[in-house]
Image (tube, helix red, strand yellow):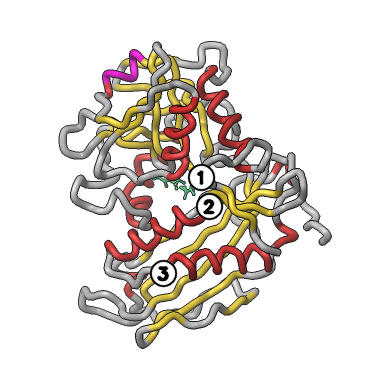
């Protein structure tokens, strides 16, 4: 298969048109067959619940080409489970796990020429989403849903790639409430954070670090990724909170940190602890591991990357994770699945 003519090593994290997207509809109690289309637009009723009442949930996962030329997907079952959980929590019809996996395989196969070649550092980002499509004006679940999956080749989320970024602790904006929907992947959480991240960028920071909304004391997560710190004794610490997204990347890093003897622990992390860490990082599908170079909290700033380079632990975790994702390291935990071609 001839690859698309792209500058693979330099693609940004953004939307690029590919050949097909895939759509299923839920109507009268069942999911339809999947329909592949080249149309990038969705015909939709103007009173659809996704447009008014936020019935929308999405996922993000990555597909890689291995050295042997196989196309593989990372932890697809976990994304399937999370989308079902997100959908159920906002009363949308959950997509069954096998349908989700079928959709990922189908849409990747239909766009195989967009899977970035091994060794370019790029990947094929898969974006599944579920939306409420039926018209309602009263606040009620839609009863009709569309499950769409599109793909786009991507480079690193933070344009610096595996280079330290600068965060600012956000105190004026809450991303999510403790008993709200911060633990699921729904569009409203990102809309809620836009003003904070835009302001942070205007002030020269890469992203914000949110605190828990109740006590404004414990670290929650960053805008597009989970957060971890590495203590001076080399322990991997990551926030335990009901209002953060349970990151599949972070879950994987906890496993890898265990193997590296980093005694990983999930617990509430007081924001003051940032001043004692040796290293810190953001992690997620898009962010992979992005080392944190500095964190500004009020009038204080802690600098981790004094020479502008990622720390030893972040580097080790990054190498271990990415080697498994592209099939260079043994997949001991069964995280990688071949996309049958
Ligand atoms: N937190 C938020 C708010 C995110 O949007 C993401 C991205 O998916 C993550 C964390 C990381 O989750 P994952 O590693 O499953 O991609
Ligand atoms: C991902 O990492 O897949 C995400 O969805 C984060 C998003 C803000 C790009």
| Marks 3, 1: nearer the viewer | 3
* Residues at marks 2 and 1, CA–CA distance in whole angstroms: 6 Å
Whether residue 17 appears in magenta in the rendering, the answer is no
Mark 3: give few (<14), some (14-19) or many (20+) Cα within 10 Å: many
Rendered-image quadrant of the N terminus: bottom right
User: Is 214 displayed left or right of 209 in the figure?
Assistant: left
For the residue pair 280 and 173, the one nearer the viewer reads as 280
Asked which secondary structure carries label 1, the reply is loop
Give the residue at x 72% y 52%.
70
Q: Is residue 199 above or below residue 11?
A: above
- Report the span colored magenta: 272-276
User: In the rendering, at what x and y percent does residue 339 appear?
Assistant: 64, 59
- Crowd band around label 1 with a 10 angstrom C-alpha radius: few (<14), some (14–19), many (20+): many
Residue at numbered disc 2: 61
On the image, numbered disc 3 is attached to which residue?
A: 95
Mark 3–mark 2 distance (CA, rounded to whole Å): 16 Å
Q: Which residue is mark 1?
A: 285
Question: Do residues under tags 2 and 1 come within 8 Å of each other at their CB atoms?
Answer: yes
Q: Earlier in the sequence, mark 2 or mark 1?
A: 2
> Label 1 CB, ligand 1: below 8 Å?
yes
């Amino acid at each position: 298969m001839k690859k698309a003519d792209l500058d693979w090593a330099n693609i940004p994290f953004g939307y690029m048109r590919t050949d097909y997207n895939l759509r299923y509809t839920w109507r009268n109690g069942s999911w339809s067959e999947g329909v592949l289309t080249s149309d990038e637009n969705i015909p939709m009723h103007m009173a659809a619940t996704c447009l008014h009442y936020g019935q929308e949930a999405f996922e993000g996962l990555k597909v890689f080409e291995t050295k042997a030329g196989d196309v593989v997907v990372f932890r697809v079952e976990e994304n399937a489970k999370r989308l079902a959980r997100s959908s159920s929590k906002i009363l949308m019809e959950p997509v069954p796990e096998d349908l989700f996996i079928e959709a990922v395989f189908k849409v990747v196969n239909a766009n195989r020429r967009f899977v970035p070649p091994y060794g370019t550092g790029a990947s094929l980002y898969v974006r599944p989403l579920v939306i409420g499509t039926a018209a309602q004006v009263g606040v009620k679940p839609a009863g009709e849903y569309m499950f769409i999956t599109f793909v786009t080749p991507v480079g690193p989320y933070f344009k610096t790639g595996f280079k330290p970024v600068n965060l600012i602790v956000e105190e004026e904006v809450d991303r999510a409430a403790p008993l709200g929907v911060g633990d699921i992947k729904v569009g409203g959480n990102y809309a809620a954070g836009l003003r904070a991240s835009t302001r942070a960028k205007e002030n020269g920071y890469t992203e914000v670090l949110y605190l828990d909304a109740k006590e404004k004391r414990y670290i929650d997560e960053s805008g597009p990724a989970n957060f971890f710190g590495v203590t001076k004794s080399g322990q991997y610490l990551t926030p335990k909170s009901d209002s953060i997204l349970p990151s599949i990347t972070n879950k994987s890093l906890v496993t890898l940190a265990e193997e590296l003897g980093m005694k990983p622990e999930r617990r509430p992390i007081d924001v003051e602890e940032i001043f004692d860490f040796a290293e810190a990082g953001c992690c997620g599908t898009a962010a992979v591991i992005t080392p944190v170079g500095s964190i500004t909290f009020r009038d204080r700033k802690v600098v981790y990357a004094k020479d502008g380079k990622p720390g030893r632990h972040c580097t080790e975790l990054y190498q271990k994770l990415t080697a498994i994702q592209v099939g260079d390291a043994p997949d001991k935990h069964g995280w990688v699945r071949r996309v049958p071609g």
